[in-house]
Image: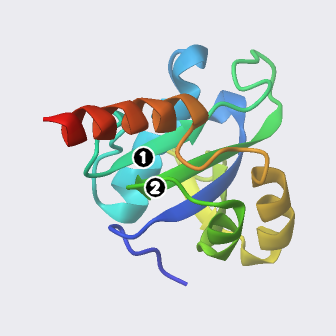
Amino acid sequence: MAIDSASPARVCIRACVTDVLGDPLNRTTTLGQEFCRKILNRQFQSMPALARYDHGHIPPSFDSLKPVSVWFVFDLNVTSELTKGQLNNLPHYVYLASRQRAGELEFISRDDWSDMAKERAKMYTWGGRQEQEELREMRNRQGRQ
């Protein structure tokens, strides 16, 4: 199932943290940038904006110096808040990110992991809790003008 690069979707990526090169504190953003560039052929839009943005949730142990595997969760094309029901009905795509066979990250679709990944991702607020609050404030300011 191919991802529409312009439609809202949640992407769960299982990766060994040391496979994501660069500063360990930037791994979530780096992985989001690589995924969007390679799979969606577009930039990772991490700055909250009323029109659309992408959000990477920061998982536990993302900055480990040891080769541990974690689930990175990305909300793509966020335009508004979603209820839990709406989020559950949104497409969820699952990938394994690996640097094993090539010098750069490969993203391997893992549809058989969908149920497990969807269950793990439930804990995260669509688009990020703080970012949604910022957008609410932006909309309120815009409505007062």
The residue identified by callout 2 is 76
Quadrant for the N terminus, please. Answer: bottom right
Q: Which residue sits at x=46%, y=51%?
A: 35
**Foreground pick, 117 / 38:** 117
Q: Which residue sits at x=39%, y=70%?
A: 7
The tag earlier along the polypeptide, 1 or 2, is 1
- Horizontal and vertical percent for residue 80? 43, 54
Q: Quadrant of residue 12?
A: bottom right
Q: Amino acid at mark 2?
A: Leu
Mark 1 is surrounded, within 10 Å at the Cα level, by few (under 14), some (14 to 19) or many (20 or more) other residues, namely: many
Q: Answer yes or no: do the residues labelled 1 and 2 have beta carbons within 8 Å?
A: yes
Mark 2 is surrounded, within 10 Å at the Cα level, by few (under 14), some (14 to 19) or many (20 or more) other residues, namely: many
Is residue 116 visible in this depiction of the protein? yes
Q: Is residue 14 left or right of residue 21?
A: right
Q: Is residue 44 left or right of residue 95?
A: left
- Horizontal and vertical percent for residue 14? 73, 50
Q: Quadrant of residue 138?
A: top left
Find the residue positioned furthest to the front: 144
Q: Is residue 32 left or right of residue 118?
A: left
Q: Which mark is residue 127?
A: none
- Horizontal and vertical percent for residue 125? 65, 45
The residue identified by callout 1 is 54
Q: Which residue sits at x=46%, y=55%?
A: 76
Is residue 20 visible in this depiction of the protein? no
Q: How is the image coloured?
A: rainbow
Q: Amino acid at mark 1?
A: Asp
Find the residue positioned furthest to the left: 145
Q: Which residue sits at x=71%, y=26%?
A: 62
Quadrant for the C terminus, please. Answer: top left
